[in-house]
Amino acid sequence: MLNNRFWKKRAENYNKTSWVKDDHLLDAYLSLIPKNNIYKNILEVGIGTGVVANKVVDMIGPMIGLDKSKEMMSKIDHEGINKVVGDAHNLPFNDNHFDFIYMRNVIHYLENPTKAFAEILRCLKNGSFFLFSQVIPFSDKISEEYDELIGRDIHYPNHGEINELFSDYTIIKEVEYVLEGQSIMNWLDNTCDDKQKKQLIIDKHKNTSNMYKKMVNYREDNDDISVDIKHLFVLAEKK
Ligand SMILES: C[S@@+](CC[C@H](N)C(=O)[O-])C[C@H]1O[C@@H](n2cnc3c(N)ncnc32)[C@H](O)[C@@H]1O
């Protein structure tokens, strides 16, 4: 599992990774927030540098943001966001407290996503919503190849595995959103400062299967590689 040192280093450049602040991606995700509800208690789990939260506060009101990395949260500068250092596996909140909880791109860093999903369920009020977002492999069939390519010794849960995590929720809506033509060099420049490792990951991409390359619309141009990246959004309700 990636430790706090990883996030301490990553905090400086995190917002420069192109998907992080992509407005189309953010708008598509946040358009799933149910309208006409009053949200008094809102929580983001794994808030990071607050990119999503900055928009959420403006849309539906002040909120709590929890993250285990204080360095990531030190980049947040919005008076509507109350920062809490904590762990998604053990949320420091009462049962049935929140009207709305959301989480983007956190579960691949968790030792036990099932436990985090149970915690989120515990902290939600009955009839309230959980809005989830996650980068997923283009198809469940290439799950292993995907983990190998990212090269971080972590597992990216695929669509099928994510559906299992929602077994105690009622799924209201699922959307697969494709972010086209993402630069591998932009991602590596902002997430990896080990030159050798960078080169290894580039070589791995160049040597992927034709099936993978076709699925992700693989392109090599100049000194970069571009691929499409799939995100899964799930809106679910506490039964
Ligand atoms: C890829 S970032 C996502 C940040 C933000 N949600 C976003 O979409 O920009 C993952 C975040 O999850 C946090 N994180 C990882 N493991 C965690 C845990 N067990 N509990 C709380 N936060 C965690 C990291 O510190 C990091 O800020």
Image (tube, rainbow, N blue to C red):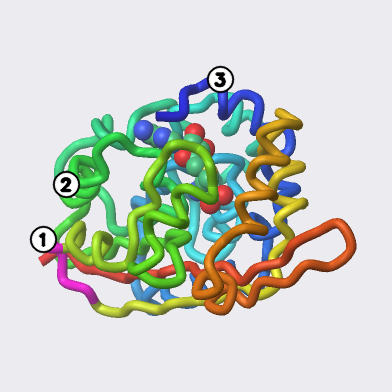
Residue at 53% in and 66% down = 209
Residue at disc 2, secondary structure: helix
Check disc 1: other Cα within 10 Å, few if <14, some if 14-19, many if 20+.
some
Question: Disc 3 marks which residue?
Answer: 5
Question: Disc 1 marks which residue?
Answer: 168
Question: Disc 2 marks which residue?
Answer: 118
**Dot 2 and dot 1 residues touching (CB under 8 Å):** yes
Tell me where residue 196 appears, x and y as whole percent: 71, 31
Instruction: Specify whether residue 168 is painted magenta.
Output: yes
Point out the image quarter for the N terminus: top left
Residue 104 shown left or right of residue 155 in the figure = right
Vertical position of residue 59 compared to residue 214: above or below: above
Cα distance in 3D space between marks 2 and 1: 8 Å
Cα distance in 3D space between marks 1 and 3: 34 Å
Residue at disc 3, secondary structure: helix
Q: Which residues are magenta?
A: 167-171
